[in-house]
Image (cartoon, helix red, strand yellow):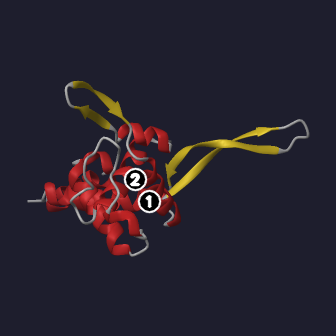
Amino acid sequence: MENLEEMKCINDLRGVSVQDVPADMFINEFAASLEKSGNFAIPKWVDFVKTGVQKELAPYNDNWLFVRAASIARRIYLHGMLGVNTLRTMYGSKNRKGTAGPHFRKSDAKVIRYCTCQLKKMGYLDLIIDKVEDDNGNMIDLSTKGKVITKKARAEMDKIATEIYKKLHPRN
């Protein structure tokens, strides 16, 4: 009987992915993992930059850049091929202008571009490039279609999600 319960628990954990755990818990754990790795370089401007024109102040959290990078990685994991402009729209918010009505503004592109570049250097993201054949039969790179998660990143993110799932659903 104990073996049956143990096998059931193992089967439950076999298919755990990022979408099976709460977003805030996963993002905080993955941000801590990025910070602990030491491969994610922190720029000088991180203390002064705002995350968009609609914001009044810079983020208060000291490790906000790791949190943003983890959030970007999670969004690309869940939604597939995404570019910087799409991510800008996802992270945008309302710009309040006093008595005038609020208007939507996209988020800052530099922060998103920097995070995706650092994740790419760490081997977590790959670029998908649109190629076309010219008259001579040579392949020409037109533009990037977006960014996707690598197998290495998917494995690490699923491992973190499994640990969170184990914390949330302890075995009796």
Q: Amino acid at mark 1?
A: Ala
Left-right relation of 171 to 70: left
Identified at 51% across, 60% down, the residue is 120
Q: Nearer the viewer, residue 158 or 1?
A: 158
Quadrant hosting residue 103: top left
**Measured from the top left, where is residue 93 in percent x and y?**
30, 37
| Structural crowding at the residue carrying mark 2, measured as other residues with C-alpha within 10 Å and reported as few (<14), some (14–19) or many (≥20) | many
Check the image and report above or below for 22 versus 38.
above
x then y, percent, for residue 102:
26, 27
Q: What residue sits right under mark 1 in the picture?
A: 153
Where in the figure is residue 156, as x and y percent of width and height? 38, 62
Q: Which residue is farthest front?
A: 99
**Residue in front for this viewpoint, 107 or 29:** 107
Q: Secondary structure at mark 2?
A: helix
* SS state under label 1: helix
Q: Residues within 10 Å of mark 1 (few under 14, many from 20)?
A: some
Q: Give the camera-side residue of 72 and 107.
A: 107
In the rendered image, the residue lying farthest to the left is 172
100 w.r.t. 91: above or below:
above
Residue 94 picture quarter = top left
Residue name at image x 25 percent, y 52 percent: 57
Label 2 – label 1 distance at C-alpha: 9 Å
Q: Residue at x 41, y 48 (%)?
A: 77
Residue identified by numbered label 2:
73
Is the residue under label 1 in contact with that under label 2 (CB below 8 Å)?
yes
